[in-house]
Image (cartoon, helix red, strand yellow):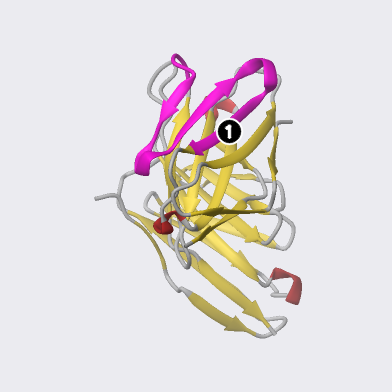
């Protein structure tokens, strides 16, 4: 079965600093990988996804992630943090026929310090 | 605009009550999902449905059942609520995969925060 590990349940950065949220996965087949964001009292919103092709994926709000097969990683980055980036972030890998189901990591809460 | 709605944002129920959580999507999606979200555990799949009247167990189905009588509606049922079912419940829907490398996105509702006393 596939699994996802997010390193660090809480990450705190200063406004304008680099954001790096780590995600490692295990999968016996080429994976589809996702990052979702959850703002307070809201559902999840897709930030970006990797399916095939280019390993550097760009998403919304200036985020990007790089699929590294050799490291089984899909870390999320943003060059310059903004206060509005404060949220919880979830990494997920798909499994099952037709990539129907998602397996989520435990989440990382990102805090932005002024 | 894509829309997944959940019938309640907050619910308070008593132990032993039968609880219904409703989810409706307006995107004509084939697939619908119920997740439970708990701090430090991320989202865990309870049940999903890939067609009307079709359902499959997820990772934590115990104590829950589901119903999908119409394509747009997917209900989660707690037959006899217990305090360990206090949680945030998220519904999602997803279209059918249309080709190699093409993965449809899951769209999430705002969640229902359930407190069982």
Q: Is residue B21 above or below residue A43?
A: below
Q: Residue at x 37, y 39 (%)?
A: A62
Image quarter (top left, top right, bottom left or bottom right) of the C terminus of chain B: bottom right
For label 1, the SS is: strand
Where is residue B84 shown, x and y percent of the image? 75, 71
Q: Nearer the viewer, residue B97 or A15?
A: A15
Q: Is residue A97 above or below residue A87?
A: above
In the picture provided, is A8 more to the left or to the right than A81? right
Whether residue A69 is in magenta: the answer is: yes
Q: Where is residue A15 shown, x and y percent of the image? A: 46, 54
The residue tagged 1 is A75
The magenta span reads A52-77
Residue B105 part of the magenta segment: no
Give the chain of mark 1: A
Q: On the rendered structure, is A107 left or right of B21?
A: right
- Residue sitting at x 54%, y 49%: A89
Q: Position of residue A100 (x, y in %)?
A: 53, 34
Q: Quadrant of residue B116?
A: bottom right
Q: Residue at x 48, y 58 (%)?
A: A86
Nearer to me, A113 or A48: A113
User: Is residue A100 among what the camera can see?
Assistant: no
Query: Residue B68: x percent and y percent?
Result: 48, 53
Number of residues whose C-alpha sits closer than 10 Å to that of mark 1, classed few (under 14), some (14–19) or many (20 or more):
some
Residue A57 in view here: yes
């Amino acid at each position: 079965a596939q699994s996802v590990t997010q390193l660090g349940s809480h990450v705190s950065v200063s406004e304008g600093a680099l954001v790096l949220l780590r995600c490692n996965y295990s999968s016996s087949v080429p994976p589809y990988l996702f990052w979702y964001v959850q703002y307070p009292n809201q559902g999840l919103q897709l930030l970006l996804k990797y399916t095939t092709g280019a390993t550097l994926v760009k998403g919304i709000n200036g985020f990007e992630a790089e699929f590294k097969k050799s490291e089984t990683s899909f870390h999320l980055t943003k060059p310059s943090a903004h206060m509005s980036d404060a949220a919880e972030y979830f990494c997920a890998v798909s499994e099952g026929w037709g990539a129907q189901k998602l397996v989520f990591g435990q989440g990382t809460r990102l805090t932005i310090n002024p | 605009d894509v829309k997944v709605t959940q019938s309640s944002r907050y619910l308070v129920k008593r132990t032993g009550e039968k609880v219904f959580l409703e989810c409706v999507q307006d995107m004509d999606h084939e697939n619908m999902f119920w997740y439970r979200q708990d701090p430090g555990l991320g989202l865990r799949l309870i049940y999903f449905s890939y067609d009307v009247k079709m359902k499959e167990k997820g990772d934590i189905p115990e104590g829950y059942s589901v119903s999908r009588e119409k394509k747009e509606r997917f209900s989660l049922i707690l037959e006899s609520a217990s305090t360990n079912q206090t949680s945030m419940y998220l519904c999602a829907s997803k279209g059918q995969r249309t080709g190699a490398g093409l993965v449809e996105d899951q769209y999430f509702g705002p969640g229902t925060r359930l407190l069982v006393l």
